Image (spheres, coloured by chain):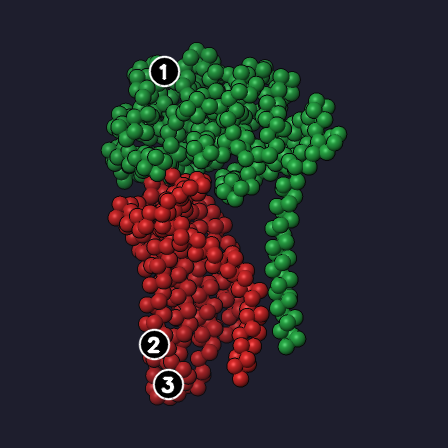
Amino acid sequence: MPTKSYKKYISLFTFVAPAFILYAVFLLIPTISGMVYSFTDWNGLNRNYDFIGFGNFVEALTEDPDFVGSLLFTLKYVVFMVVLQNVFALLLAVFIESRRKTKGFFRTIFFMPNMISTIISAFMWTFVFAQVLPQLAEKTALTFLDQAWIGDPKVSFFSILTVSLWNGVGYMMIIYLAGLQGVPQSLKEAARIDGANAFQTFRNVTLPMITHAITICFFLTLNGAFKVFEVVYGLTGGGPGRSTQVITMNIYEEAFSNNFRYGYASAKSVILFIIILIFTFIQIQVMKRREVEA
Amino acid sequence: MKKIVKGMMITALAATVLAGCGNNANSTNNEGGSTGGGEAKSVKLKMFIAQPRFKEQYDKYIAAFVAKEKADKNIDVSVQLEMPTSDNAAQILKTRLASNDAPDIFALHATNEIPSYYKAGYLEDLSDQPFVGKLLDSVKPAVTTNDGKVVAVPLETISWGYLYNKKIFTEQGITPPTTLTEMKAVTEKLKANKITPFVLSYKEAWIPQLLLPLAAGALIETGNKDFVERMNKDEGSFTEMKSMFDIFDLINANGTDKATEVGGDDGAAAFAAGKGAMWLQGPWYAETILKNDPNMDFGVAPLPINDNPDATLINMGASTSLAVSKTTKNKEVALDFINYVLDDTASNDFFQSLKFNPISNIHTYDSYPWVNDAMVYIKEGKAYQEPKIPQSVKDEVGKGLQAYYAGQLSQDDVLKALDKAWQSYNKVNK
């Protein structure tokens, strides 16, 4: 009966409506209007603004060295973060999984930094980098600790990485732990009977079995690293100059300081959105293909 | 079927409730202006002042104003005072203005915000209000637009140069230098006595930024009068201001180390602890410095930028100012309040309690020593109006000088970036 399917849609709609309306009002509509603004020269204050087509996009990619610079810096950060965060998280997960009695203890300890809000951990680490480490260097003979950890653009990149990893690894570790616990014991035992050593078991049994966890973790780290803001804001503020400015900061600066070019900043946000979309799309496509079922 | 209908109705109900919230808010807002009673008119005045730390003082002053309106004009005024923190105040205000929900009276930054808000048509012309005549001549230009209209009453004004530790200066028998050569001699003498001449704090970009208003202001005042106008027409260049690096290099060469890791508060602590004799900073950090050391004795002096003693001048600027919205429905009461800010009898105590500098000849209270220091220079005519450099250029100079300090940019790179920032400002605001 045709009315039946019609009814189905009504009940679907009624169930989805409350969440969907909120989602639309607070997320979907602002996102779309942001995209509309990206084609204008609105400055956030004037009542009148003009549509200028792709002018903002062309300017961002061709005439704005600061934007391109921040984009490259972000890419560098993304590469380091995606690799290091997943490697560390997986190592920790494997290590914790191998414990028997102290499993809960280590899991809590390594997850704890994740419970502190990013901006607060950034401020904590600012104190560590600016006060504690130089003092340590003074009291002990470890002179290499006495550096401009967040003031020198060459070093500060690694300071930012350190804090991001410290803060972010715990969460990925939990996902990997769940994945590891889902690997059937029987498969591992079978591999051992076939004469595989620990590394071979891990490489050929465990890893393929947790590919779905890897997919999720890669997606989260990739996505998160592109959108990094608080850590850099709290540690260096993008400085000195613009040497550690990430792309979100460049957008923020364009919209809320400088010339308040909301339209232009929206265009930059759209560019960031498209970049993330492409990267995650490719990543998920590639990794989905490698997933296997037990 | 019944269940579906029920579900639909609940959804509809939820939607109307949500919509109802919005409607209610609107209707209460409109109430104020339109309901005029027979005997006592009642007016609801909305104010937006981003200084929550002064809530007590404002509340008290507003209460006095309400009493006065009732007595003089038989108007029942109820004031709805909104005090967001200054970090997000500009955002909230812009949203209000853009959504036609403008507060009747709002605070904004005189030099940084008045031009763009005036151009967007949000500010009422106040030129013919009585308070204008009471303003000091040195303050008035800060709230006057380029076409000569007074659009706000200033509250907070600042006279600044750099801060110096009076105790160290007396011990060493030195006085604030008036030329660059004298400044060099002073730093040499301090260094000879194992005192670091300058506290450096460049972590936050706005602190090195302070150099530009100081150096450019003095250079503009002594011979380059039309610099800002020419820059606005894309005809000038910051290469004319290159000599500002002379003093900047001198400060950097004789300062505390790791400057890019020291923020404003850390700098205040270092300055209060006597880790440097001078600090490129304004007296707005007085409170923080005194918190670190209540007995700290420091003064404000003009920064020498070249060997012309006439170019060693105090910078005078206004920051927080009150403006009236062009769309206000309660114009009469709003204007009354604006004038009441400089009321002949009440204003003196108000400004004193806020610890702001005097801005009118009706202000006769005693100010702080550092304010008096600056006033001495101002009375000698050794001061200039903060030049109207666009905010985006100031942001750029902060970043540029940070990078210059870190050795990433050359002087020419910085100047070129500044030219570009001003050009793009012109392009956006044409």
Instruction: Identify the secondary structure beneath mark 2.
Output: loop
- Mark 1 is on which residue type? Thr
Is A289 on the left-hand or right-hand side of B6?
Answer: left
- How far across and how far down the image is residue A287, in percent? 35, 72
Residue tagged 2: A289
Q: State if disc 3 and disc 1 touch (CB < 8 Å).
A: no
Q: Write down which chain is painted red.
A: A
- Residue A77 percent coordinates (x, y): 34, 55
Query: Residue B237 versus residue B143: which sits nearer the camera?
Result: B143
Report crowding for label 1: few under 14, some 14 to 19, many 20 or more residues within 10 A (C-alpha): many
Real-space CA distance between mark 2 and mark 1, rounded to the nearest whole angstrom: 74 Å
> To which residue does mark 1 refer?
B178
- For disc 2, the neighbor class at 10 Å (few under 14, some 14 to 19, many from 20) is few
Identified by mark 2, the residue type is Arg
Q: Amino acid at mark 3?
A: Ala
Query: Going by the image, does B263 lie left or right of B135?
Result: left
The shade of chain B is green
Report the Cα–Cα distance between label 1 and label 3. 84 Å
Give the spatial CA distance, label 2 vs label 3.
24 Å
Q: Secondary structure at mark 3?
A: helix
Q: Looking at the image, which residue sits at the far right?
A: B39
Quarter of the image where one finds residue B353: top right
Q: Is residue A238 visible?
A: no
Give whichever of B22, A84 is nearer the camera.
Answer: B22
Residue at left offset 41%, top offset 24%: B147
The answer to the question of whether label 2 and label 1 lie on touching residues, with beta carbons closer than 8 A, is no
Give the label on residue A191, or none: 3
